[in-house]
Amino acid sequence: MKLFILWTLFGLSFAQHNPHFRLGRTAIVHLFEWRWVDIAAECERFLGPKGFGGVQISPPNEHIVLGSPWRPWWQRYQPISYKLCSRSGSEDEFKDMITKCNNVGVNIYVDAVINHMCGAAGGEGNHSSCGSWFNTSKKDFPGVPYSSWDFNDSKCKTGSGDIENYSEKHQVRDCRLVSLLDLALQKDYVRGKVAEYMNKLIDLGVAGFRVDACKHMWPGDLENVYGRLHNLNTTWFPSSSRPFIFQEVIDLGGEAISSSEYVHLGRVTEFKYGAKLGTVFRKWHGEKLCYTRNWGEGWGFMPDGNALVFIDNHDNQRGHGAGGSSIITFWDSKLHKMAVGYMLAHPYGVTRVMSSYRWERNFVNGKDENDWMGPPSNSNGSTKPVPINPDQTCGDGWVCEHRWRQITNMVIFRNVVSGQPLSNWWENQSNQVAFGRGDRGFIVFNNDDRDLDVTLNTGLASGTYCDIISGQKEGNRCTGKQIHVDGNSRAHFRISNRDEDPFVAIHAESKL
Ligand code: QV4
Ligand code: CA
């Protein structure tokens, strides 16, 4: 009986940590600023067949529309209402995307912006993505509706009304983040409106949420909102499935609020992961890849079952948020492929791959003056479609890291080795390391300035395997390097530091 009670308590409180991936899938891709019609097509033609577990989408709710043609990407983090028309498309297109993605086993996770509405200087009018009228000086958002009663200003004690000091908990949660009108989430009415929005999405078939700016909301308020959420739609998910919740809290240490305040409510973004792994692959501050022998909790990260991990995100790839300098993005493609490969091979956390668009960077005194630039757009400000080139890469400025062969194949690797422990660790006491995942997969990295030439115990069954980094298995042939594993599980690896991608990965399903 005692055990049963423990089990139910544990089951309830940790239910929102489960991403509800289908068919042994294990990775999320953030299709930043993609249109719903393009995501629907991508689920059917690529993400489903390649085994991706889910997509994090940009905020689907009505947002402010800024300028003509300015339209920064971050306008979508300034809600006007919870109507489902946005820069990514209409409600009908949204519904169609959810159905199509779910039908091919790919989950949709919504970026939920519930801490605030638009900036205080947003003005009056209907410059909004569904045309809802609003007035920021009156704090009037009839599209929800919210009125001045529904905001926190009276609780905020700073002179400016904005957050001025991150070492004071109360102002971080009750004042305005960069002037964004801060919702009074302690009010039953506000909680109800937010939950109504999220429940509409759940009923349409989303699998969960990336909850924006959680550091700026009280855990008790979030607990109340999450408690009001429906179970997932049983057309696609087992009955009693709770929505997957992963909360954005940037905790690099040294602030009043830490990620540990949120881990009982759902997973939390582990920002130390990409910042540290960036430092390691860049070999800054004397870091070496061999020091990652105890990667994960051993590096001071949150417990495995609570973490959502990624190499870069839409903020820190362009200098927004915090801790960006070591972050490895698609701009450093060789290092990016290795770091993403490392993340996907390693058992720690639920993994998210970034999929970006290119913009024209313009550094002035170390700051990118173009960090605001929105997605590839037409002259009227509408977002361009994502065209697929004959070689399967994307055109028109869409980077599509998730389609880079090395990254796609590592997503498959993660599925194949799922549930297997880290095993057969090897290192050269510098920047060459290798590790396996039980008897299902093995990966070798050479981030030194010299060649790697070594025979290692892989844990795999004997046979010839196709390296999924330099190529892949196609039918019965291999377009990349071949690795021969002998009867004792040993294999010889040679990786030049001048290779286009100085790492090799093999797994049970890349066996020829
Ligand atoms: C500016 C000034 C204010 C001033 C105001 C006057 O900074 O001091 O009072 O003008 O009007 C944009 C502008 C910002 C502007 C603000 C309000 O960049 O300069 O304020 O709008 O008009 C994204 C962008 C922000 C953007 C915001 C809203 O990154 O630049 O602000 O959207 O459009 C912290 C948080 C963390 C957050 C991170 C960026 O703890 O939660 O900062 N990350 C998430 C999202 C992020 C998003 C938000 C939160 C806000 O990942 O993309 O911010 O929803 O670390
Ligand atoms: Ca707040």
Image (cartoon, rainbow, N blue to C red):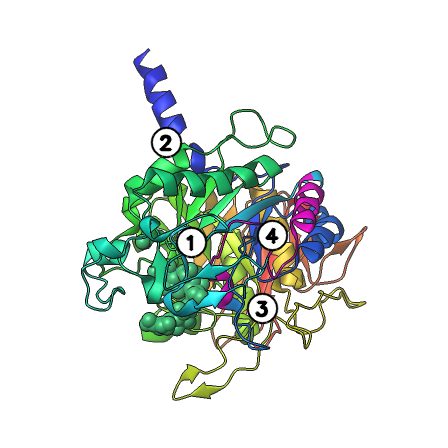
The residue type indicated by label 3 comes to Ile
Residue drawn at 60 percent across, 52 percent down: 411
Q: Amino acid at mark 2?
A: Ser
Picture disc at residue 13: 2
Quadrant including the N terminus: top left
Label 3, secondary structure: give it. Answer: strand
**Numbered disc in front, either 1 or 3:** 1
- The residue indicated by pointer 3 is 495
Judge depth for marks 4 and 1 and give the one in front: 1
Image quarter of residue 31:
bottom right
Mark 1 CB near ligand 1 (8 Å cut): yes
Q: Earlier in the sequence, mark 4 or mark 1?
A: 1
Taking 18 as reference, is 106 left or right? right
* Mark closest to the chain's N terminus, 2 or 1: 2
| Residue 79, image x, y percentages | 47, 57
First of labels 4, 3 by sequence position: 4
